[in-house]
Image (spheres, rainbow, N blue to C red):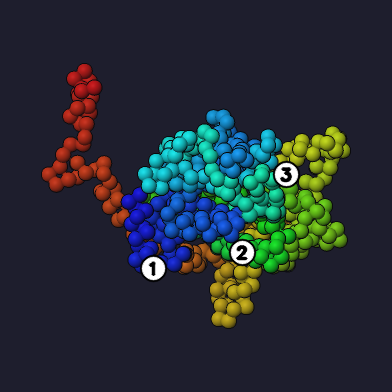
Amino acid sequence: MRKLCAVRQIIEREQLDVFEAGLLKYLGNIGGIGLHDNVFVPTLLNMTTREQFSEWVPRALSYEWIGCYAQTEIEHGSNVRGLQTTCTFDADADEFVVHTPTVGATKWWPGALGYLCTHAVVYARLILNGKDYGVHNFLVQVRDTETHMPLRGIELGDIGAKWGTNTTDNGFVRFTDVRIPRTNMFMKFASVDSSGKYTKSGPDKGSYGTMTQVRAGIVAMSFNTLATAVTIAVRYGAVRRQEPGAEEERPVLDYISMQHRLLPLLAASYALRFTGEHMMNDYLALGKEKKAKGGAVSGPMVHALSCSLKSLCSTLTLDGIEECRRSCGGHGFLLSSGLPQLYTSYMPMFTAEGDNYLLTQQSARFLLKCLKGEAHAGPLLDFLTKPRQLRAVLSTRSSADQLLDSPAIVGAFKQRLASLVVALGDEVDLYLDSHGKQSLADALNSTLVTQYRVSRALGYLYIVVSFADAVQAAEQREGSKDIAAVLGSLFTLFALSAIEKDLAEFMSCGYIDVKQSAQIRAALLRQLAEVRKHAIPLTDAFGKSDFELNSVLGRYDGQYAQALYESGVRDVANRAQMSEGGAAIPGYEEYLKPFMRGEEARARL
């Protein structure tokens, strides 16, 4: 909390803009306040009426209120429809009564709930005259704004130590008949009047806006995290030398095996950079569409894309961090390398705002609707909705001389997606033909593995298209010929590496044959050699300072050996024996000395 105050003072004193303030909070690792800024406030911005907006938003922006997002329960997380917390309307009092009916309905995991927040966006089942209207959102004050003590009927606290991110106060809360004003229901998309009449005033999935925004933010943030890990590993690989028997050892990054491990991750960092920007632009365009048309036909598509990309990008980032750590050998296991903390800090993104496996179901089912012409697909996926275009995509074959062209690469990912979506539709239809049309839920359950593959294919297509657009923009920019060439190499390396990992899928859809698969592997090795020439400047371009990296291995000056030695000397465990005059390590006289002399009985146990 002391750090939180210090960070705010710096922001106000230096008049930092939104980006600079966000970076300072990230580097300061100030925990749950990020959930207030990035989830609670956007919920208030997106889901309130004018009256609610004017009353609530200024207090949240000034931190008079600090909020959390209380959706997840002990027994239900991604399955929002299964949440059990209730909010029952009392017409006589014109109030809602919030209640936790079972231990399993306890809200569990909300960041900022353990210590910081005064208010919570609570997901609860709306009950009117005994009828369940499903899950809606309510603003509930949980602590007194003067004493910061829990209010009557509210039991809350921190959930305890976690594998990582322990500066974030993830908490729990239980409600026992807690009364809130009727107007504390978020009423932009649905409302309840004083008589208990329920009225919808927006789309069924209007409340998905906040989660779509948060997931788009996770996609954008994945670049920064992976770029940090890649910078550390590539810089270390460029100065760490090893070659048994050689008079002058070579840098480990010059070994093709190390390049194959790290350089595709360097390319992926740039891919995620352009994808995050593209995804945020799509989300912002969705907001403009809502204002212009009073609704957004692109909403389901952007939601599906955010689900697919959140799952894929966070998985690529988490796996990439671990590969970077492994590539640094034993030194990568040290906390001073900066990589273990990076991994544990990012690890929650795999589950946060939707489990990475469960989210893919939403993307895959949207694509099935596109295939049946039941959803607006947008330019990227328009080919799925038009049978003639779909047949053309499915029948396309690449030639050897075109295999590495940008259009051919995009075509490969497009056909892979089309083939998988058609296969998914066939699997569902076959199940329904065998088990009856009433078995749709079972049919979807039986195809979950294919749905995951379909969602990954969608995410990869979006990433490849975003990257290709960025390369094309650089080519058209005056004076950027050299930059465009390097970006083109990164694009090709990223795409070929992705194809190599999922080669079976690209071959099974017919776009690539056995001979071409060998050509792809050979081309991949050539791209590694090309990107290796620019590896250090490309990591320097991320602009990561030594302070931000916080790594003895990723130092800008390359002096990792000196940095490692100094970090060992400074370690708290060495203070006694390395202090001036010297002293035995703690516990030597009491335990180790008797043990070494066979006098365990004299030890002070």
Above or below for 161 versus 363: above
Q: Which mark is drawn over residue 284?
A: 2
User: Is residue 106 visible in this depiction of the protein?
Assistant: no
Q: Is residue 305 left or right of residue 273?
A: right
Identity, as a three-letter code, of the amino acid under mark 3: Thr
Q: Residue at x 65, y 38 (%)?
A: 127
Q: Which residue is mark 1?
A: 15
Q: Which residue sits furthest bottom?
A: 478
Residue located 73% across and 38% down the image: 445
As helix, strand or loop, the secondary structure at mark 1 comes to loop
Contact, mark 3 vs mark 1 (Cβ under 8 Å): no
Depth check, front residue: 291 or 359: 291
Q: Secondary structure at mark 3?
A: helix
Q: Earlier in the sequence, mark 3 or mark 1?
A: 1
Q: Nearer the viewer, residue 17 or 604?
A: 17
Crowd around label 1: few <14 · some 14–19 · many ≥20 (10 Å): few
The answer to which quarter of the image holds residue 249 is: bottom left
Disc number at residue 450? 3
Q: Is residue 12 left or right of residue 469?
A: left
Image x and y of residue 242, in percent:
41, 54
